Image (cartoon, grey):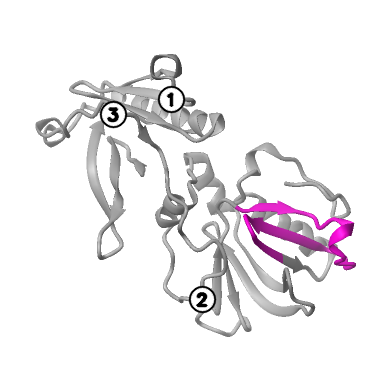
Amino acid sequence: MFFLFNDILLYTSRGLTASNQFKVHGHLPLYGMTIEESEEEWGVPHCLTLRGQQQSIIVAASTRSEMDKWTEDIQMAIDLAEKSSGPAPELLASSPPDNKDPLSVSDCTSLPAGLISDQRPVSISYVCWYRMQSLSFYDILQSNENQLSGNLLRKFKNSNGWQKLWVVFTNFCMFFYKSHQDNHPLASLPLLGYSLTIPSESENIHKDYVFKLHFKSHVYYFRAESEYTFERWMEVIRSATSSASRTRALSHKEPHAY
């Protein structure tokens, strides 16, 4: 798991500590770093070499678009670091051992993909780790502009009835309350990795203003009270779904993926 800061790129080990925190594996100062595509050299798709002043590491993203996001953000951070007064002495004093094996940007899938009933918040880094997702600087900025709350009707894949809930969308996650007066959510649904679609006719929903969220075998239907609220929910949720950067706005009658 990689964390990009304004002066270093931090990478952690695969395991989590007992306190659910990431264990630091090493870091690479951004000052003086260069980025090179190295798929041919290593024979690994979507592979990059990050060359620092004292060491280099090889990383591989899961997709081309993810690699492009990382490249853009790392290069932006490098440019900002170059404009500063240089790296902090403590960053140059210690460096992790060289590792010539490619390091995967993300490589785990065991986070519960469905609703989380525990009231404790699930951190975004935790979701990224287990869902194999990356968040760019632009994604974070967009999340600050896309927050919404209101009533929605929810239906599970294998259920017949609809449950009315007060729903709050913020920080890439939907929180479900029995009413707007409740202080604690009944459950939450982190949306990173989910796809946003309109139900097809074969799903036999037969309701207006319905959208569908699905990730692997997990499927949820949500129904808005009006066309306006439907469009607003689609707009904000689209910002958190995996296909958000590659889609266009569709009307509620079009059975296409967002």
- What residue sits right under mark 1 in the picture? 47
* Residue found at the very far left of the displayed protein: 93
Going by the numbered disc 1, the residue's amino acid type is Cys
- Left or right of 210 in this view: 5: left
- Left or right of 233 in this view: 228: right
- Left or right of 12 in this view: 240: right
Task: Classify residue 29 by image quadrant.
Answer: top left
Identify the secondary structure beneath mark 1: strand
- What residue sits right under mark 2 in the picture? 117
Q: Quick check: is 209 in the magenta stretch?
A: yes
Gap between marks 2 and 1 measured at Cα: 38 Å
Choose the circle earlier in sequence order: 2 or 1.
1
Task: Classify residue 231 by image quadrant.
Answer: bottom right
Q: Position of residue 239 (x, y in %)?
A: 62, 49
Q: Position of residue 14 (x, y in %)?
A: 31, 48
Instruction: Say above or below: 235 vs 208.
Output: above
Q: Position of residue 98 (x, y in %)?
A: 19, 28
Asked if the residue under mark 3 is in contact with the one under mark 1, i.e. CB atoms within 8 Å, the reply is no
Report the mark closest to the observer, 3 or 2.
2
- What residue sits 42% from the left and 44% below the top? 107
Q: Which residues are magenta?
A: 194-220
- What residue sits 90% from the left and 67% below the top? 206
